[in-house]
Image: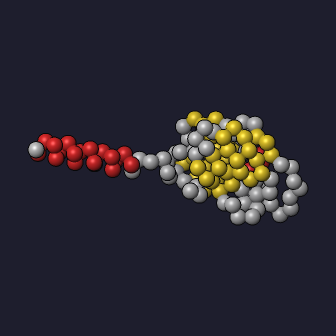
């Protein structure tokens, strides 16, 4: 009987321990990033690498590749509106890396061009 209790307690402990290892706040690329406030960049990344978002003015959608904590954006379809008073740095992004609750975006040359905070 004590063995069954010990095994049951061990199983419950393992489940609780593993649930604490959820990707939220770690290196999981999928999720909502940035802000949906007017003029602010945002990105929604799905587990299969597909994404949609905005640079604060133009909307975009595409299919990227996720490898570890990195999202390679690949080709994207994007609207081409003329925007004033909006920094459209997100439209120049080619990849993003996640560290905790922050995704740092990089242009094609590898230069850091902006950051998005996790929003989910």
In the picture, measured across the screen, residue 83 lies left or right of residue 65, that is right
Residue 54 percent across, percent down from the top left: 74, 53
Give the position of the N terminus as an image quadrant.
Answer: top left
- In the image, is residue 24 above or below residue 110? below
Residue 4 percent across, percent down from the top left: 16, 43
Residue 63 falls in image quadrant = top right
In the picture, measured across the screen, residue 18 lies left or right of residue 41, that is left
- In the image, is residue 101 above or below residue 3? below
Residue 74 percent across, percent down from the top left: 72, 36
Residue 108 falls in image quadrant = top right
Residue at 67% across / 37% down in the picture?
64
- In the image, is residue 52 above or below residue 64? below
Q: Can residue 42 be seen in this view?
A: yes
In the picture, measured across the screen, residue 2 lies left or right of residue 80, that is left
Q: Which residue lies furthest to the left in this view?
A: 1
Q: Is residue 115 visible?
A: no
Residue at 86% across / 61% down in the picture?
84
Residue at 83% across / 63% down in the picture?
85
Give the position of the C terminus as an image quadrant.
Answer: bottom right
Residue at 89% across / 56% down in the picture?
82
């Amino acid at each position: 009987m004590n063995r069954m209790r010990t095994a049951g307690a061990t199983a419950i402990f393992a489940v609780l321990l593993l649930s604490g290892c959820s990707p939220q706040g770690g290196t999981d690329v999928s999720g909502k990033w940035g802000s949906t406030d007017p003029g602010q960049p945002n990105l929604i990344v799905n587990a299969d690498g597909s994404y949609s978002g905005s640079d604060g003015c133009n909307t975009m959608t595409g299919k990227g590749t996720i490898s570890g904590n990195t999202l390679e954006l690949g080709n994207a379809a994007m609207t081409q509106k003329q925007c004033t008073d909006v920094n459209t740095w997100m439209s120049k992004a080619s990849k993003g890396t996640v560290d905790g609750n922050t995704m740092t975006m990089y242009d094609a040359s590898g230069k850091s061009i902006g950051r998005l905070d996790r929003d989910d």
